[in-house]
Amino acid sequence: MDIKRESVLIMDFGGQYSQLIARRVRECNVYCELRSYKLKADEIKKAGYMGIIFSGGPNSTYEDSAPKCDPEIFRLGIPILGICYGAQLMAQALGGKVEKSETREYGKTEIECNPSSLVFHAGRSKTVTWMSHTDYIAKVPHGFKVTAISEGCPVVAMEDIKRKFFALQFHPEVNHTEQGMLYLRNYLYNACGCTAEWKMSSFVTDTIARLREMIGDKKVLCALSGGVDSSVAALLVHRAVGKQLTCIFVDHGLLRKDEGDEVEAVFRKQFDMNLIRVNAQERFLTRLQGVSDPETKRKIIGEEFIRVFEDEAKKLGRIEFLCQGTIYPDVVESGTGDAAVIKSHHNVGGLPEDVGFEGIIEPLRDLFKDEVRKAGIELGIPENLVWRQPFPGPGLAIRIMGEITEDKLEILKDADAILREEIKASGLLRDVDQYFAVLTGIKSVGVMGDGRTYDNTIALRAVTTSDFMTADWARLPYDVIERISNRIINEVRNVNRVVYDVTSKPPATIEWE
């Protein structure tokens, strides 16, 4: 993209924390992009990056197959920070030596550092960092000096202040490194000269202006799900071109209780959008009749969604652009790393080519999920929508084990609503990253009143996670679980047992299907 703002490049060498580095840089109010280590020096120079960060990675630099950067990068005059593998790569590329360590350092490690060095400026001389390495820098390159050591590592950090090259064997981006954010700020502000201008208010204003210029007098269509990504994307376009945007909200009947009405109220009444709500529950349930296999359910729902969207789109006549809620992790995971507000139409998430869009508008391609939420608040979207729980495209269909029926949907909607109400009432909204109820398909014996019952079992699932790649089960207070269980048993028909899922990811997934 054409970088008009100050920006830092993060070169990804396959490290598990690469996206986390990018998030931490953004938290310092500095815009950054995560790109492949294969990016050439001339492309970097043309883009005008103010700094370059080499990420960690699983390889050893002395292996023939180890990823290497373009050596011309070191002659661009741009400050470089190497982290873990990136530090070792810098050392080896510039004439130092990297060797296999006899003792592997992993986890929390105390280091001694020089507070007069640029990266460690204003920090403590002894601090705790997070290490993860089997190799170490045995010899620093000419022009470098060692700025930190540990009991098991002779070069925890090094710097060449003249060329503004810095290397850290540990990970400053993880929470376990006590002063990690200080070190990143020192590099970004003092070495790169960044001014911390990346703020959500300026992003919103700039994006609206760019969208207005790009779209002109043409029309835009958006598939609005009610989730935070599509909601924020749609509202940015609406602020830019108003009624030139039409949103299609396909209500497949598999949403949470009252969710369809809430989405319609916010976007049609509060924001005065052109919103078409398609109530298609009967159509979806008919297609799903007799289907129990989870992958088949997903496929049917995805295909039917496309057909409904296509039917409605064709009624509207000529529409030039499609708006999508693509966010930055989607871009990075696709391997493109080419963040842009608009691109040529190639494949619209499975939509058929003959819908006829000229291009796709993706105003959130620069943002991580937490930044999307901040943009939503900046735009005035109600907090309950901005902080809405992550919700799968197939909706409650994959939270009902076995065949989907209208009766089962009502049971699950009522149980899930109680769970959400009690989490909110207990002040735990921001402490639990995802929570929902599952209709397990298991029936068991119970006693209610003076009679024997044989009824449904509801499972409660709540997890904490930073990236949704791994997750731990949430330690909800027992009294909260007790209230949820009692309410479900007493208020939801045909349920006589509630269980709590205490499985992490892995080995389990967050969803049950």
Image: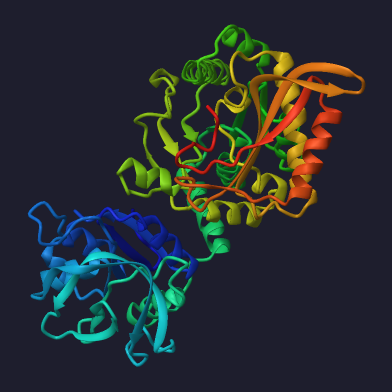
Residue 296, position in %: x, y? Answer: 48, 15
Residue 475 vs residue 210, the one in the foreground: 475
Residue 148 vs residue 406, the one in the foreground: 148
Residue at the image position 24 percent from the left and 81 percent from the top: 158
Above or below for 407 versus 199? above
Residue 35: quarter of image:
bottom left
Above or below for 230 versus 95? above
Residue at the image position 41 percent from the left and 67 percent from the top: 173
Residue 142: quarter of image:
bottom left
Residue 93, position in %: x, y? Answer: 11, 69
Residue 412 can be seen, yes or no: yes
Residue 392, position in %: x, y? Answer: 56, 32
* Residue 95 horizontal side relative to residue 129, left or right: left
Residue 447: quarter of image:
top right
Residue at the image position 56 percent from the left and 56 percent from the top: 204
Residue 113 vs residue 109, the one in the foreground: 109
* Residue 127 horizontal side relative to residue 106, left or right: right
Residue at the image position 71 percent from the left and 18 percent from the top: 408
